[in-house]
Amino acid sequence: MQVTTTVEETRKLVKNWKKEGKTIGLVPTMGFLHEGHASLIRRCREENDIVVVSDFVNPTQFGPTEDLEAYPRDFKRDSELCESLGADLIFHPEPKEMYHDPHAYVSIDTLSDTLCGKTRPIHFKGVCTVVSKLFNIVAPDRAYFGQKDAQQLAIIRKMVQDLNFDIQIVGCPIIREEDGLAKSSRNTYLSAEERKAALCLSRAVKTGQEAICKGIKAEEVLSKMRAVIEAEPLAKIDYVSMVDALDMQPVESVEKDVLVAMAVYIGKTRLIDNFSYEV
Ligand SMILES: Nc1ncnc2c1ncn2[C@@H]1O[C@H](COP(=O)(O)OP(=O)(O)OP(=O)(O)O)[C@@H](O)[C@H]1O
Ligand SMILES: CC(C)(CO)[C@@H](O)C(=O)[O-]
Ligand code: BAL
């Protein structure tokens, strides 16, 4: 497995792989890898000749009061895991390799305004910008994203369609701990007591899945889910919402495919979870 830190050396490798007619799969990550990331890398390994993992804590997707500095990092452990999963390359640039001032940005309207975009107004502009850059640097045939970040996945699909990237976007299911908590790098922030409290997210998902059916009012499903979270003293709801699966706009009843998504503060840690319902 190779490690690159610059755009130039990454492009050189990509050029050679393309010359040899190899297909390239890309797994974008912010590092501190866990089983959720591993599931994306395994799928990428199965479907491509070359597997590239990017490991970059992208500063432009963090708001000024968010956890950019505190975000967990362990590149040695990440590279060992990637190697054991058969990755060919980790692209691990420094922020100064990726950004200079002033810089061009990519943003997607409407889909970025709801759910996480309400609380994190610059977040998806940063995500779209860095993912576009990674797509241009690595030129993958396929790129792999987790359903855990369901709004991100919908936005990337829209970006690829609207900006004519010739890349197949592969969505991968949410990987959970045995007790139901969705795996996330941010779980590491939780104290033992908070870790128990965090189970209210997956409990709310289960409650929502049991309540939802075609034609039901969104509020009936969402109020049951909110009650589960509100019963947990350490939890504070950021949002629990039902949106159209494609445009991420709120719906009042279940008539088309929907995404039911939530963000909840457990102490100071903001966690997300969701489920999709297909009509
Ligand atoms: N539990 C999971 N199941 C499936 N995919 C996941 C899971 N956790 C993360 N991913 C996916 O891995 C990719 C990289 O995510 P990222 O590096 O931000 O990890 P994360 O654990 O989601 O971190 P964070 O704590 O910031 O949410 C994204 O496409 C994300 O959706
Ligand atoms: C897609 C991504 C790697 C862009 O920084 C990030 O948002 C993430 O880890 O989900
Ligand atoms: N997985 C999304 C990365 C973030 O929260 O910034």
Image (tube, grey):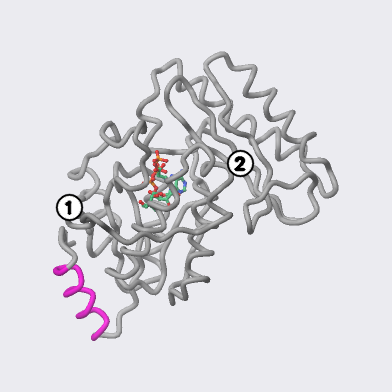
Is label 1 in a helix, a strand or a loop? helix
Q: Is residue 165 above or below residue 190?
A: below
Quick check: 59 left or right of 182?
left
Judged by depth in the image, the label closer to the viewer, 1 or 2, is 1
Check disc 2 and give the amino acid type.
Ala
Quick check: 271 left or right of 25?
right
| Residue 46: x %, y % from top left | 40, 67
Mark seen at residue 213: none
Residue 17 shown in magenta: yes
Residue at 43 percent across and 27 percent down: it is: 269
Is label 2 in a helix, a strand or a loop? strand
Give neighbour class at mark 2: few <14, some 14-19, many 20+ (Cα, 10 Å): many
Q: What span is colored magenta in the figure? A: 8-19
Magenta segment main secondary structure: helix
Mark seen at residue 261: 2
Residue at 51 percent across and 33 percent down: it is: 181
Q: Earlier in the sequence, mark 1 or mark 2?
A: 1
Along the line of sight, which residue is nearer the eye, 95 or 79? 95
| Residue 25: x %, y % from top left | 36, 68
Q: Is residue 95 above or below residue 170?
A: above
Q: Is residue 205 above or below residue 278?
A: above
User: Where does label 1 land, which residue?
Assistant: 96
| Residue 73: x %, y % from top left | 24, 39
Quarter in which the C terminus is drawn: bottom right
| Residue 132: x %, y % from top left | 37, 64
Quarter in which the N terminus is drawn: bottom left
Residue 135 shown in magenta: no
Quick check: 84 left or right of 63?
left
Residue at 24 percent across and 65 percent down: it is: 88
Give neighbour class at mark 1: few <14, some 14-19, many 20+ (Cα, 10 Å): few
